[in-house]
Amino acid sequence: GGFTYDTSDMATLKYRIEETGADWVIYVVDMGQATHFVVLNGCAQRAGFLDPAKVRVDFVGFGVVLGEDKKRFKTRSGETVRLTELLDEGLKKALDTLKAKGRHEVLTPEELKEAQEAVAYGCIKYADLSHNRVNDYIFSFDKMLEDKGNTAVYLLYAYTRICSIARTANVTVAQLEQAANTTAVAVSHDKEWKLAKVLLRFPEVLTKITRDLYLHSLCEYLYEIATSFSEFYDNCYCVEKDSASGDIKKVHIDRLLLIEATARVMKQCFNILGLKTVARM
């Protein structure tokens, strides 16, 4: 006899549970297959090799990527867009964006290449992950490469800006780590308090995305960190300089610790989302 798509999936699920010892199986496929996986789950339970109390099986459906004409994303000739072509186009557009901002004049060739790749690959990944996965979305490089709003470019710029503050203050990571053991973060200003509360929600957000498997929640959280930090930085002096000479007069180490915590949480978010960060952009 032959075999069908259904029986192949049944056999595969049985193998994953009984042979590989999987305790959590996640199917990431088109939303159009939702009914199939509901039936598969039920059949596996009735067949006796899937016990929901011991093995978690999730169907993670995703919507369709559309072109700007709101039809399925294809090439002009009607063919499926290849990922390699998409990434190459992303590299070109990312470099154009960086040059338009004059970054090629202040970055070394190596730094420019790193920034180009981080922006190109990051903007494509982030655009996909920042939408509710069950919804269709329109693919647009122009929107992806905007440096305002909930985009990878804005967040990567925000992160590099945050990382540069300690360098500007001539404070090393080792000094910050030492200060973390002896210095209390006062959070006396409203914007300090707001940022600190956002950072403290990180474990809660991780629990939520692990439970629900909707990564756009993490993207929204990352954007909330960046906007809360911007409000904090605009209202709270971290490094005070002499207006005439530009020399550093005072460093608020407790605020630098809050900045370091912000950078570390953002870095973890980027890692989970698969986005590469750079030191300078």
Image: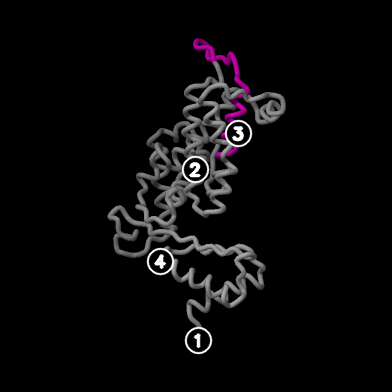
Q: Secondary structure at mark 3?
A: helix
- Residue holding disc 3: 261
Q: Residues within 10 Å of mark 2 (few under 14, many from 20)?
A: some
**Which amino acid type is marked by label 2?**
Lys
- Residue holding disc 2: 113
Instruction: Specify which label sits upstream in the sequence, 2 or 3.
Output: 2
- Residue stretch in magenta: 241-266
66 sits to left or right of 248: left
Instruction: Specify which label sits upstream in the sequence, 1 or 3.
Output: 1
Q: Secondary structure at mark 2?
A: helix
**Which amino acid type is marked by label 4?**
Gly
- Residue holding disc 1: 2
Percent coordinates x, y for residue 27 in the rendering: 52, 64
- Residue holding disc 4: 32
Q: Secondary structure at mark 1?
A: loop
Is 216 above or below relative to 240? below
Q: Are marks 2 and 1 in contact (CB under 8 Å)?
A: no
Tag shown at residue 94 = none
Q: Are marks 2 and 4 in contact (CB under 8 Å)?
A: no
Q: From mark 2 to mark 1, how far is it between C-alphas? A: 52 Å
Percent coordinates x, y for residue 62 in the rendering: 44, 59
Instruction: Specify which label sits upstream in the sequence, 2 or 4.
Output: 4
**Which amino acid type is marked by label 3?**
Ala
